[in-house]
Image (spheres, coloured by chain):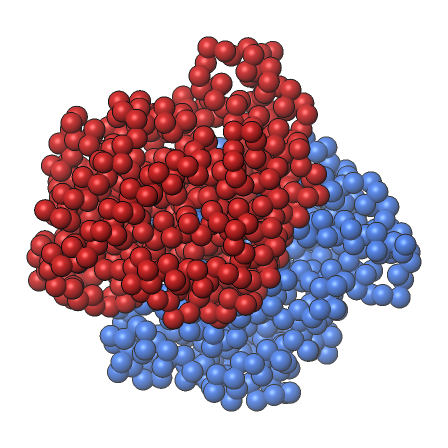
Chain colours: A blue, B red
């Protein structure tokens, strides 16, 4: 039997275990009652540990190596095995007890975060968070190899293979300079602040389903539920679910969460059978995933063309002031730029500033330049300096995002990189097809067809190779800056 | 180490596995998208088989036997071990491959039932159902011991230990005679047919939460979701979930589903720590469980006293015609007797006739007197004879219930037994506390307190012993007949 056939036995086991873990995790975030969260999380941990124990199995590693040898001509299998081995060889370095302790620390921190955020009390979270960050530092120090200079490099590399602090520093310094310099100009140029009236949860929910249908998310192979922090998860070949949240006082929050998560899901739902059969579905990096969520959310989702397709659905479901709203007023409401406290609710222009703040903090935190107890003050000072706003409590400050609570350090830059990739890809897409016309007419099948053939089919590759394959060019920050200039400064 | 301590290691494993299975099963019924049902069911099967393999482990059986020896004075542990050993010794008789084939046959039949019901086409279901019934016959023939005369006795015994066809025949013949003789009289005596106007799903959903809160279901340790067939499931100590369905054209359907499933859940949520620590939570038989669901749904839920507490919630959430509805009109609407096709939507009076029809058919089917292909015609003939109505298709006929599709033969009598137990228990409860007054004032905490101390605390016992413990008497059909006479014939 060929090694790849042997490897598949393991891969199918991992796939099944991953499916189970994803079902329980989705349940935890959408359905589990408050008093059962801890018990169900404990249950989940058993299967996370079982997954890790397969990954570090020495026979599995040997079979993966053998497969690499035998399948030298197959780039998908090469990439798959390299990824598996990176993970397995890393896990093999770690004492399983140690690994379980880290996972437990992340979970305890995540639970403490939930409670502390609700009670707006950072001190309840701090002791648990310190342990989670310490676990992440230990993890990073084991993961760090000679190509990395800092612990943060090791964190970044886990999400964006090959990307280093220096790369992000270079990109973000251009971005930061542009955004901070132009923010006051954008604010001066734009029209008056839109009036956002409240809308009930049920109406927003009905709207969500129609919007998902419009953009091409397949609900026969998906589900939409409510969770505190919206997310998407690809559970299995025919089950890619998303979540949203409903803020009665701002309908935009759910609307763009749904389009964002729908964008993620559309990528997952459109992987080819060939990718699935080679087990390279799911190798897209965080930034490549965020490319498509933010392409749908912003580049397409907040465009004039989309307003034409979207406004009738809002008129139907939200009623009230929408009945007499013009496309121009709607466009203004969803593109109004205003420095604010909450990243996920922020406008497209200031969004990257929120990311840069997080990047600067998490980099210094993991590298040991600052400690957890210093973060709230640093957070508040940076918000004041860059955006001119100050949180009145830590729940709308440092505790607003879930990421840091469970050790996901190094993810935030992916959102900003996604914006950059997305602008470059949209530029290319517009050379091939009449994007605005299709979006205007709600013909998202045509957009998805292009993405499926010219983009998603390559998303398993290293991000720099992928981007070149899709757009013919290396990453250029200018596409995104040009997009912002054209939209906000003209 | 004492044997019970060793046994606990197994019991905790089984408890955890059961928890996992329940999470996935709840997900399947409430959230899984259509195209993923099959794959997720396959996943579930792995863990169902793992559960069975622990049950048939020879060391587990030895430890359970040892525990029985050591704990002769502890009736809870005796009952627990007897139940475990019954199951384990039975499983040990079955070839594991055979067992897996049966489980697969039930699942395939259940999936075929879903599709066939949707398409109103019994022929799509028949071949799968035949295999499921054949599996159940094989199962029953292995389960049948010298105390049982028929295969159906073995099926019944699985839900109601010690109960036999003859017992049910005797009870149901009295019930049937009373119901069929009095149905025309009840119909003549009652007022005019209520007008049921449509109400949107969202309003009904909002109402559901308030009703659950009113009757004392703890949502901090539970959840309410939508599924085709309402059910309740006790996932773990702090997680007891229910489901409902929303029929826009008849608000009564959701309302009484929620009260029924809420009633189940209230029993589960009020087991004592002592029962939990002795692993006898969950030993209540199907009829004892249905006792409490139907106590809440009917005996309390459709009473004049409850109308007083419930109507204001309907006025608040359903609005429309409820705004000017009187308590008398509302009482009439939820108690109107009318022979109909669908069991779960039927009134309290004709309900038991639906059960008797199912009993007569499933008994003859399992005993081999009739075959699956005969059932639709027999079903339709009995509906015509007993209730004077005829299904226009098999989806509102023989395919309406989920039970038979997955081999759950012998469960239906539990619903009718539940009615009988419930009436007898309510009679006792009324001797101790002012039930009507508490219900009228929505003081369900007082009702639950009585149930917790005088009823739920004994529900792990054999049903005949339990009933005597709670009411001081053996089962008497008259309490239920008196209740019906008082309510419908006075």
Q: Is residue B105 visible?
A: yes
Picture coordinates of residue B55, whole percent (x, y)? 62, 31
Residue A343 point in image, percent of width and height? 44, 59
Residue B251 located left or right of residue B261: left
Residue located 11% across and 60% down the image: B191
Q: Quadrant of the N terminus of chain A?
A: bottom right
Residue A208: name its quadrant: bottom left
Camera-side residue of A56 and A251: A56
Q: Measured along the vertical axis of the image, is residue B394 above or below residue B404?
A: below
Q: Is residue A184 left or right of residue B424?
A: right
Q: Is residue B306 left or right of residue A425?
A: left
Q: Residue at 86%, 46% (x, y): give it.
A: A62
Residue A223 visible in the displayed image: no
Q: Nearer the viewer, residue A139 or A244?
A: A244
Could you say where residue B106 lies in the image, as x and y percent from the top left?
Answer: 57, 51
Answer left or right for A75 relative to A395.
Answer: right
Please tell me which residue lies in front, B316 or A319.
Answer: B316
Does B466 appear above or below B356?
Answer: above
- Residue B61 against residue A274 in the figure, above or below: above
Q: Residue at x 60, y 11 (%)?
A: B1
Identify which residue, B202 or B289, lies in the foreground. B289
């Amino acid at each position: 039997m060929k090694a790849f056939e042997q490897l598949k036995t393991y891969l199918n086991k991992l796939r099944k275990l991953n499916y189970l873990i994803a079902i329980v995790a989705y349940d935890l975030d959408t359905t589990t009652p408050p008093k059962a969260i801890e018990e169900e999380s404990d249950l989940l941990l058993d299967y996370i540990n079982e997954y890790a124990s397969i990954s570090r199995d020495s026979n599995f590693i040997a079979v993966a190596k053998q497969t690499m040898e035998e399948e030298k001509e197959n780039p998908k299998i090469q990439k798959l095995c390299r990824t598996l081995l990176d993970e397995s060889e890393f896990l093999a370095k770690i004492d399983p007890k140690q690994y379980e302790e880290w996972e437990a620390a992340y979970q305890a921190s995540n639970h403490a975060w939930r409670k502390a955020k609700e009670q707006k009390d950072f001190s309840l979270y701090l002791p648990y968070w310190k342990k989670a960050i310490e676990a992440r530092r230990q993890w990073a120090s084991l993961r760090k190899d000679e190509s990395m200079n800092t612990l943060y490099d090791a964190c970044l590399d886990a999400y964006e293979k090959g990307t280093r602090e220096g790369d992000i520093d270079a990109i973000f310094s251009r971005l930061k300079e542009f955004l901070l310099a132009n923010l006051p100009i954008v604010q001066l140029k734009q029209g008056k602040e839109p009036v956002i009236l409240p809308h009930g949860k049920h109406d927003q929910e009905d709207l969500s389903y129609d919007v998902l249908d419009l953009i091409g998310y397949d609900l026969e192979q998906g589900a939409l539920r409510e969770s505190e922090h919206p997310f998407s998860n690809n559970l299995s070949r025919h089950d890619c679910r998303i979540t949203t949240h409903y803020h009665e006082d701002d309908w935009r929050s759910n609307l763009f969460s749904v389009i964002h998560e729908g964008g993620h899901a559309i990528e997952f739902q459109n992987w080819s059978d060939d990718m699935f059969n080679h087990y390279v579905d799911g190798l897209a990096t965080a930034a490549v995933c965020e490319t498509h969520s933010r392409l749908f959310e912003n580049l397409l989702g907040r465009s004039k063309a989309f307003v034409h397709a979207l406004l009738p659905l809002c008129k139907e479901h939200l009623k009230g002031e929408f009945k007499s709203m013009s496309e121009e007023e709607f466009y203004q409401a969803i593109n109004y730029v205003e420095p604010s406290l909450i990243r996920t609710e922020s406008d497209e222009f200031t969004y990257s500033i929120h990311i840069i703040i997080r990047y600067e903090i998490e980099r210094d935190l993991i590298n040991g330049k600052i400690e957890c107890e210093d973060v709230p003050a640093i957070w508040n000072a940076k918000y004041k300096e860059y955006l001119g706003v100050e949180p009145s409590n830590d729940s709308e400050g440092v505790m607003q995002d879930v990421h840091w609570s469970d050790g996901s350090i190094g993810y935030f830059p992916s959102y900003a990189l996604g914006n950059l990739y997305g602008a470059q890809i949209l530029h290319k897409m517009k050379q091939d097809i009449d994007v605005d016309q299709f979006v205007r007419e709600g013909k998202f099948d045509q957009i998805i067809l292009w993405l499926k053939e010219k983009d998603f089919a390559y998303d398993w590759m290293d991000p720099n190779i992928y981007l070149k394959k899709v757009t013919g060019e290396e990453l250029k920050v200018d596409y995104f800056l040009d997009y912002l200039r054209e939209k906000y400064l003209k």
